[in-house]
Amino acid sequence: MCMFVSRVLRGVQSFIMSSKYNVVFVLGGPGAGKGTQCAKIVEEYGYLHLSAGDLLREERDEAGSEYGELIEGHIKNGTIVPVEITCSLLERAMKKSEKDNFLIDGFPRNQNNLEGWNKEMGEKVNLKFVLFFECPLDVCTQRCLDRGAAGSGRSDDNIESLKKRFETYMNATMPIIDHYDAINLVRTVNATGTPEEIFEEVKKLFS
Ligand code: C5P
Ligand code: MG
């Protein structure tokens, strides 16, 4: 009897989990290598990669987007776009993909992102963990400046925007990482090495 009940409960639990989106949040400072590592995870483990920053840049570039100017203002300033916009771009991309496993990169970046996401998506998502790329500021800065010099075309890979992006990261994003750390959901990877070295560490978390 007892075994029967527990088997039924396990079945119910696995049904609920399987009907939800599986999500790994990917966080770290500007230039920590989130995008680079996500591409490798996609190749090896078949997740779908959604970058909040990329989705916002796409929306900004959409002809006639009512949010274009607002988004570009935040990007140049290194500040965070209101969650209603970002969350709906993410949810739309998730639905459209018809996939179940997502790497959500560059989100949630502040308290507003976190609360808006929990309200809209909390019940629809199984958050597996938060992948945190830890990288010192000088390394991150140099990577972004190199990326800008190599022609990233980004309006925020310059020293003025970078200063503001780091400020936002320290003041608004670190508390979100601390929040997830307090509930044991953060998996930290040292992100100072080469992409290959870093990916060796990442693999341990996915296999
Ligand atoms: O992650 P990425 O560096 O591509 O983000 C670029 C910019 O996009 C951020 O500095 C911020 O202005 C905006 N962004 C945002 N909210 C997010 C992610 C990115 O406002 N969740
Ligand atoms: Mg990125």
Image (spheres, grey):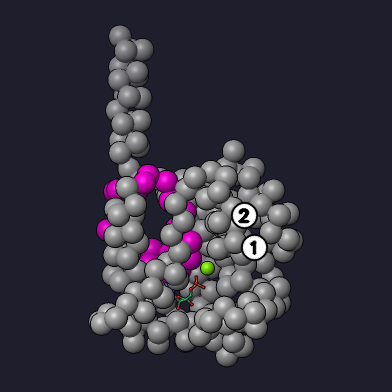
Q: Is residue 104 magenta?
A: yes
Label pair 2/1, CB-CB below 8 angstroms = yes
Q: Residue at (29%, 48%) from the top-left corner?
A: 123
Tell me which numbered mark, 2 or 1, is placed earlier along the sequence.
Answer: 1
Residue type at numbered disc 1: Glu
Which residue position holds label 1? 134
Looking at the image, the residue that sits furthest to the top is 1
Q: Residue at (52%, 50%) from the top-left corner?
A: 42
Placement of 198 over or under 69, stated as above or below: above
Looking at the image, the residue that sits furthest to the bottom is 160
Query: How far, Cα to Cα, is label 2 from label 1?
Result: 7 Å
Residue 178, how many percent across, how many down?
A: 53, 61
Side (left or right) of 9 relative to 204: left
Residue 102, how many percent across, how many down?
A: 43, 51
Residue closest to the eye, 150 or 72: 150
Which span of residues is magenta-colored? 99-125
Residue closest to the eye, 75 or 169: 75
Tell me the quadrant of the picture where the C terminus can be found: top right
Residue 156, how many percent across, how many down?
A: 53, 83
Which residue position holds label 2? 188
Residue type at numbered disc 2: Thr
